[in-house]
Image: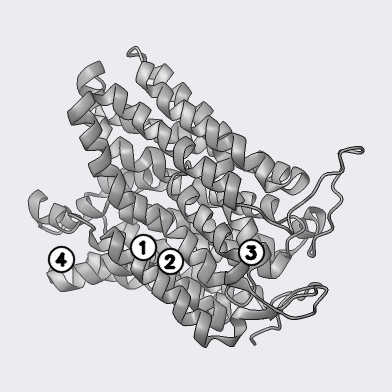
């Protein structure tokens, strides 16, 4: 499966490299010749793909799925106590992400990214020394999320949007497939470590991944010639990037449209995906039949990967808010399907696919829209705040879905609300208007 996906990625890059004229953009250099974006930028994309695969978001999530039963058995914790670690992870991201955004724009991305990779790996490995205190478990999650927030796409995506213009969407899409690829690799790798050495060694083996893979690749390959450079004498930035400063962004209506849209989208997508099995069981499927939708790669996992790539390619050709509307409004159809008690297996599969596609395009759109409408001057800070809004929505919504289910005895009320939410979030982005034009900005597709 990994081989097939990497071949697909390579083919996409090659195909659009040779057929799309937009991939060759004029750069102001001494020889004044066109510069091939992929020829110069592939090291950034490769290191970002691996770095995002092993960043704060997927690393604990995909591995705790396998480790949770071991922890519950060892320390007599409930499932709710174990998964409660994600609440503290969300809290840590809310604290850490804005700090990461601020430091990245002031000091440069590498100065934030490299130490954060090491902190993430060490703190992930530190779960191996737990003594049974649930608060120690939560404390590690919180500290790891604050110090490891520098590994989120907030940092990795900055060099991509800085160095890709005509194929920016494709480059983001390729890099962001890392989370899906790790989702295939993580469960069997974690289970093998547990079976061979036990859960404590498994945590050490997981913690070594970002240190052994992400760090050296980032150190060698992740160099952004357009990133912020700090004057060693004054300790101030000597780089002037095009775009709006953060004060200007705070009075720009587009910033709040994005905040609200991604807050709603995060809540709706996470709520459905986090409860998809229970929604299917509520429709009359047995637990075994409902689980069959998620075996192996799963409809959702494949849909997320496809959404990342197709969405990334699409925004290079089409006005991004229009692409967003298609992907983000489509899960409203999923909600209508899930509300029908007699919908077929094929229709329920379609509902999961549409939701997975929306989940796949989220991060692509977030990075792309920020870069096109606000420029690069305060990119990391802006991205961080929108990411925090998204995290707030996605972090609390699964529990809200279940609360409404417990009070009403059905998922139908929340699915009706979700359908409205998807349409509203998608429609808000249509109000963004034309792209802003900065010093090196693109021509508007409208």
- Density class for disc 4 (Cα within 10 Å; few <14, some 14-19, many ≥20) is few
Residue holding disc 3: 161
* Residue 437 horizontal side relative to residue 138, left or right: right
Tag 2 or tag 4, which sits nearer the N-term? 2
Which is more toward the observer, 391 or 278?
391
Q: Residues within 10 Å of mark 2 (few under 14, many from 20)?
A: many
* Residue situated in front as seen by the camera: 424 or 199: 199
**Tag nearer the camera, 4 or 3:** 3
* Vertical relation: 49 (above or below) 210: below
Q: Secondary structure at mark 2?
A: helix
The image shows residue 97 at horizontal and vertical percentages of 61, 42
Which circle, 4 or 1, is nearer the viewer? 1
Q: Is residue 423 above or below residue 154?
A: below
- For marks 2 and 1, give the CA distance: 6 Å
From the viewer's perspective, is the residue at label 4 or at label 2 nearer? 2
Q: What residue is shown at x 43% (from left), y 66% (from top)?
A: 308
Q: Badges 4 and 3: C-beta atoms under 8 Å apart?
A: no
Residue 108 numbered mark, or none = none
Q: CA distance from mark 2 to mark 3?
A: 16 Å
Disc 4 to disc 2, C-alpha distance: 31 Å
Q: Is residue 132 left or right of residue 388?
A: left
Q: Earlier in the sequence, mark 4 or mark 3?
A: 3
Scheme of image coloration: one colour
Vertical placement of residue 380 versus 17, above or below = above
**3 vs 1, front mark:** 3
The residue under label 1 is: 304
Mark toward the start of the polypeptide (2 vs 3): 3
What residue did someone put label 4 on?
A: 341
Which element type, helix, strand or loop, lies under badge 1?
helix
Work out whether mark 3 precedes mark 1 in sequence or the reverse, and give the earlier one.
3
Mark before the other along the chain sequence, 4 or 1? 1
């Amino acid at each position: 499966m990994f081989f097939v996906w990497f071949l697909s990625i390579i083919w996409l890059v090659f195909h659009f490299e040779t057929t799309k004229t937009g991939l060759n953009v004029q750069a102001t250099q001494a020889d004044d010749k066109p510069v091939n974006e992929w020829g110069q930028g592939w090291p950034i994309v490769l290191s970002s793909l691996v770095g995002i695969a092993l960043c704060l978001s997927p690393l604990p999530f995909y591995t705790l799925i396998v480790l949770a039963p071991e922890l519950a058995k060892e320390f007599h914790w409930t499932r709710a106590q174990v998964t409660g670690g994600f609440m503290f992870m969300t809290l840590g991201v809310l604290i850490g992400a804005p700090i990461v955004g601020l430091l990245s724009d002031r000091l440069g991305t590498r100065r934030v990214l490299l130490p954060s990779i090491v902190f993430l790996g060490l703190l992930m490995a530190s779960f191996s020394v737990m003594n049974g205190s649930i608060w120690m478990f939560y404390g590690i999650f919180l500290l790891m999320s604050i110090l490891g927030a520098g590994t989120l796409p907030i940092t990795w995506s900055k060099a991509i949007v800085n160095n890709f213009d005509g194929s920016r969407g494709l480059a983001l899409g390729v890099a962001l497939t890392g989370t899906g690829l790790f989702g295939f690799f993580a469960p069997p790798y974690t289970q093998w470590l547990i079976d061979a050495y036990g859960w404590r060694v498994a945590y050490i083996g997981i913690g070594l991944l970002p240190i052994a893979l992400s760090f050296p690749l980032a150190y060698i390959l992740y160099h952004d010639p357009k990133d912020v450079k700090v004057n060693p004498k004054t300790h101030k930035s000597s780089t002037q990037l095009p775009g709006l400063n953060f004060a200007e962004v705070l009075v720009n209506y587009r910033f709040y449209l994005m905040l609200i849209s991604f807050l709603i989208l995060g809540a709706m997508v996470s709520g459905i995906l986090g409860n998809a099995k229970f929604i299917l069981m509520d429709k009359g499927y047995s637990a075994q039949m409902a689980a069959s939708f998620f075996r192996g790669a799963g409809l959702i996992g494949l849909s997320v990967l496809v959404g990342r790539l197709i969405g990334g390619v699409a925004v290079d050709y089409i006005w991004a808010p229009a692409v967003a509307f298609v992907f983000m409004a489509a899960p409203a159809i999923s909600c209508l399907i899930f509300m029908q008690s007699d919908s077929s297996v094929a229709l329920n599969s379609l509902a999961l696919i549409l939701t997975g596609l929306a989940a796949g395009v989220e991060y692509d759109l977030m990075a792309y829209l920020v870069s096109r409408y606000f420029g690069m001057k305060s990119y990391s800070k802006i991205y961080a705040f929108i990411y925090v809004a998204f995290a707030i929505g996605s972090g609390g919504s699964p529990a809200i879905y279940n609360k409404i289910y417990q009070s009403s005895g059905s998922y139908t009320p929340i699915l009706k609300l979700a359908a409205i939410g998807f349409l509203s979030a998608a429609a808000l982005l249509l109000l963004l208007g034309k792209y802003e034009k900065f010093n090196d900005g693109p021509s508007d597709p409208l």
